[in-house]
Amino acid sequence: MDYLKVSSKSSPASVAGAIAGMVKDGVPVNMQCVGAGAVNQAIKAMAIARGFLIPTGFDISCAPVFSDILINGESRTAIRLSIYVHQLSLQNSELVDPHDVQTVA
C-alpha cells in the first residue's frame, strides 16, 4: 500500500491538494507521519482538504494507527492515517458550507 509521506516541513495546502485530487479520482488515500510536527501538518491538510471537497459532494475522515517502520536501518514509530470518503447527499440542492457550522461549548 502506498502512502503520502508527510513531514513537519510539508505544506498542508499541497498535501490537501494531493488528498482532494486522489479522492476525486477515486484513488485510496493513506498518509504516513513520523513525529508530532508531521502529524500536525497531516491533520491541517485534512482540514483544508475537507474545505476543498465538501462543496463537491464529498467529505473525508481519518483513522490513525501506529506502525513500526525502518528509516535508515533504524526502527521508528509512525502514525498512519487511512482516509475514508463519504458521499454527501444533495438535499435541497445545496451543501452545507463547513465555515457556517457552529460548535456548542
Image (cartoon, rainbow, N blue to C red):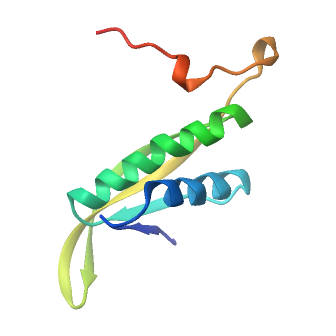
Quarter assignment of residue 19: bottom right
Please provide percent x and percent y for residue 49.
55, 45
- Residue at image coords 44%, 55%: 12
The quarter in which the C terminus is drawn is top left
For this view, does 30 lie left or right of residue 24? left
Quarter assignment of residue 71: bottom left
Report the residue that reaches farthest toward the right.
93
* Residue 57 seen in the current view: no
Between 89 and 36, the one lying in front of the other is 36
Between 36 and 87, the one lying in front of the other is 36
For this view, does 90 lie left or right of residue 9? right
Please provide percent x and percent y for residue 48.
50, 43
For this view, does 23 lie left or right of residue 15? right
- Residue at image coords 27%, 76%: 69
Quarter assignment of residue 68: bottom left
Q: Is residue 81 above or below residue 57?
A: below
Please provide percent x and percent y for residue 17.
59, 56
Report the residue that reaches farthest toward the bottom.
73
Number of numbered discs visible in the structure rendering:
0
- Residue at image coords 44%, 44%: 62
* Residue 23 seen in the current view: yes
Q: Is residue 81 above or below residue 77?
A: above
Between 91 and 10, the one lying in front of the other is 10
Q: Is residue 53 above or below residue 17?
A: above
Please provide percent x and percent y for residue 44.
40, 46
For this view, does 16 lie left or right of residue 42? right
